[in-house]
Image: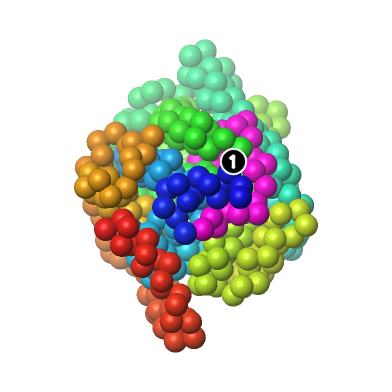
């Protein structure tokens, strides 16, 4: 019996979904995945459209959403140290809410990463268009899809190492951007120095130039920018020492948000007036073009391309693991349980990549709208996943208080209260999505997705009446 099985049985699980995986992710890689996971295309590309909608007040929206994301991650951290498993979100939903919710959450998280992968491929194609405007977006998206697929088939160590360097590039570049921006503000060098000033945050129609309502409407895009912070939970089953690496990775989240989101945007909006940014253009690329550093805009464009590829790479990793978790529970075809000779869920990754290929089609059919479509669907799926984490955490704390389950070694500050605050916030964002005509389509997609999953659950129960036994036993222990 492996140590993973012993740990899982000790906490009352029936089996270990991560069984067979290689614990090949070291502390260095998990830390950098956690740092880089929160830096993606939502910040580098999506921030341009959001600045045009909200002006400098976007900084406040990122800070507010960042606090909520920290509540979510501390709730997840408490659950992870209670029982670290590779299919964390689905497993906790299955344990505390019932087998159907585990099934629904697992498949919805898979959908989130598939459509996020589409968004990242779209963004990557847009970035390449900066250098090669004559190359069609769909061609670039297809090339990147094939390359990353090959990387994910090799081994988890190769994935972790590639993700480490992807994240290193993003982190180093963002720190460099902040330092250069502060240099422009302090010493006034370059043409941007003539107009750079902290007063740019309020000098052009105020901090809320288009009203608080317009600022709140950017929360959908802001929450999309934070998708992937929960990826550290998926790595739990393949981390060398989850009890040490996971808490450290989660506890560094506040300074990551403060530095890379709030800090970077504040500096950028001080250096360049918010009125000069446009949707579809990275504000970081635009800022460096304004500063006039030789090849600066091209360098930044390379960095944001790296960010997009990093997120897509993570998507391929997580979808394969989630499909295997579903197959372990009888909620997906058994073929997804198989591991390759390199201990990767190769078939699950391949199927996920095939669906990500729809993003290539979107880039061919509607290249100007592809990013917006997939961003809204990914956000809705991500909100569901976060809600399941929070609700599972509330129910877990109730079970601990009642003496039915052991306490976690990494309790969330504020207990269930912070989880309730985050739940209300996410429901508010969902209402904003429903109010906005452009993003409302994602709720229709999610409604259709829910009907399809409901029909699939009915078929599963008809074919295998025992499918709910495992989840029901866990629910009885928790409740």
Residue 256 shown left or right of residue 175 in the figure = left
Q: Residue at x 38, y 34 (%)?
A: 410
Is 91 placed above or below 53 here? Answer: below
Residue 266 shown left or right of residue 298 in the figure = left
Is 323 placed above or below 271 here? Answer: below
Residue 463 belongs to magenta span: no
Residue 35 belongs to magenta span: yes
Label 1: how many residues lie within 10 Å, few (<14), some (14-19) or many (20+)? Answer: many
User: Is residue 414 visible in this depiction of the protein?
Assistant: yes
Q: Which residues are magenta?
A: 15-41
Considering the numbered disc 1 on the image, is that residue within a helix, a strand or a loop?
Answer: loop
Per the image, the residue denoted by label 1 is 239
Farthest residue, direction front: 1
Is 323 placed above or below 387 here? Answer: below
Farthest residue, direction top: 187
Q: Nearer the viewer, residue 21 or 15?
A: 15
Q: Nearer the viewer, residue 427 or 205?
A: 427
x then y, percent, for residue 270: 43, 27
x then y, percent, for residue 268: 48, 31
Q: Residue at x 59, y 58 (%)?
A: 321
User: Is residue 166 visible in this depiction of the protein?
Assistant: no
Q: Residue at x 32, y 37 (%)?
A: 412
Q: Which image quarter holds the C terminus?
A: bottom left
Q: Nearer the viewer, residue 256 or 369?
A: 256
Q: Residue at x 50, y 45 (%)?
A: 7
Residue 289 shown left or right of residue 424 in the figure = right
Number of marks in the image?
1
x then y, percent, for residue 90: 45, 59
Q: Nearer the viewer, residue 269 or 292?
A: 269
Q: Quadrant of residue 119?
A: bottom right
Is 261 placed above or below 474 here? Answer: above
x then y, percent, for residue 87: 51, 55
């Amino acid at each position: 019996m492996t140590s993973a099985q012993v740990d899982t049985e000790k906490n009352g699980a029936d089996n270990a979904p991560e069984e067979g995986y290689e614990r090949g992710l070291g502390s260095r890689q998990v830390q950098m995945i956690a740092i880089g996971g929160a830096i993606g295309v939502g910040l580098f590309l999506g921030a341009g459209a959001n600045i045009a909608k909200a002006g400098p007040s976007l900084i406040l929206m990122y800070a507010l959403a960042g606090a909520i994301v920290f509540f979510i991650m501390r709730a997840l951290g408490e659950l992870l140290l209670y029982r670290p498993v590779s299919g964390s979100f689905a497993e906790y939903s299955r344990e505390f809410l019932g087998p159907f919710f585990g099934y629904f959450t697992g498949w919805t998280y898979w959908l989130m990463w598939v459509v996020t992968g589409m968004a990242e491929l779209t963004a990557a194609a847009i970035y390449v268009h900066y250098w090669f405007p004559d190359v069609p977006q769909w061609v670039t998206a297809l090339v990147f899809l094939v390359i990353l697929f090959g990387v994910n088939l090799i081994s988890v160590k190769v994935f972790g190492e590639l993700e480490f360097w992807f994240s290193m590039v993003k982190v180093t570049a963002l720190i460099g951007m902040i330092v250069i921006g502060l240099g422009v503000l302090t010493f006034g060098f370059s043409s941007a120095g003539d107009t750079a000033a902290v007063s740019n945050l309020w000098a052009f129609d105020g901090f809320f130039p288009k009203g608080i309502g317009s600022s709140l409407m950017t929360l959908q895009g802001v929450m999309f920018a934070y998708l992937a912070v929960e990826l550290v939970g998926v790595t739990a089953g393949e981390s060398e020492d989850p009890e040490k690496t996971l808490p450290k990775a989660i506890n560094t989240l506040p300074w990551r948000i403060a530095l890379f989101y709030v800090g970077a945007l504040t500096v950028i909006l001080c250096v360049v007036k918010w009125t000069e940014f446009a949707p579809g253009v990275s504000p970081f690329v635009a800022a460096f073009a304004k500063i006039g550093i030789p090849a600066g805009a091209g360098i930044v464009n390379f960095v944001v391309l790296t960010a997009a590829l990093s997120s897509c790479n993570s998507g391929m990793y997580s979808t394969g693991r989630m499909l295997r978790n579903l197959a372990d529970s009888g909620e997906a075809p058994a073929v997804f349980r198989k591991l390759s000779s390199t201990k990767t869920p190769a078939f699950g990754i391949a199927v996920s990549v095939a669906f990500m290929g729809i993003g290539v089609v979107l880039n061919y059919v509607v290249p100007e709208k592809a990013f917006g479509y997939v961003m809204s669907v990914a956000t809705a799926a991500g909100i569901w996943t976060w809600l399941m984490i929070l609700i599972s955490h509330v129910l877990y704390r109730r079970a601990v208080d009642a003496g039915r389950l052991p306490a976690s070694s990494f309790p969330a500050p504020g207990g269930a209260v912070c989880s309730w605050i985050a739940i209300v916030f996410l429901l508010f964002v969902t209402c904003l999505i429903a109010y906005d005509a452009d993003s409302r389509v994602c709720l229709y997609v999610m409604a259709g997705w829910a009907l399809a999953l409901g029909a699939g659950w009915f078929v599963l129960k008809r074919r295998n009446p025992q499918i709910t036994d495992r989840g029901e036993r866990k629910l009885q222990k928790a409740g």
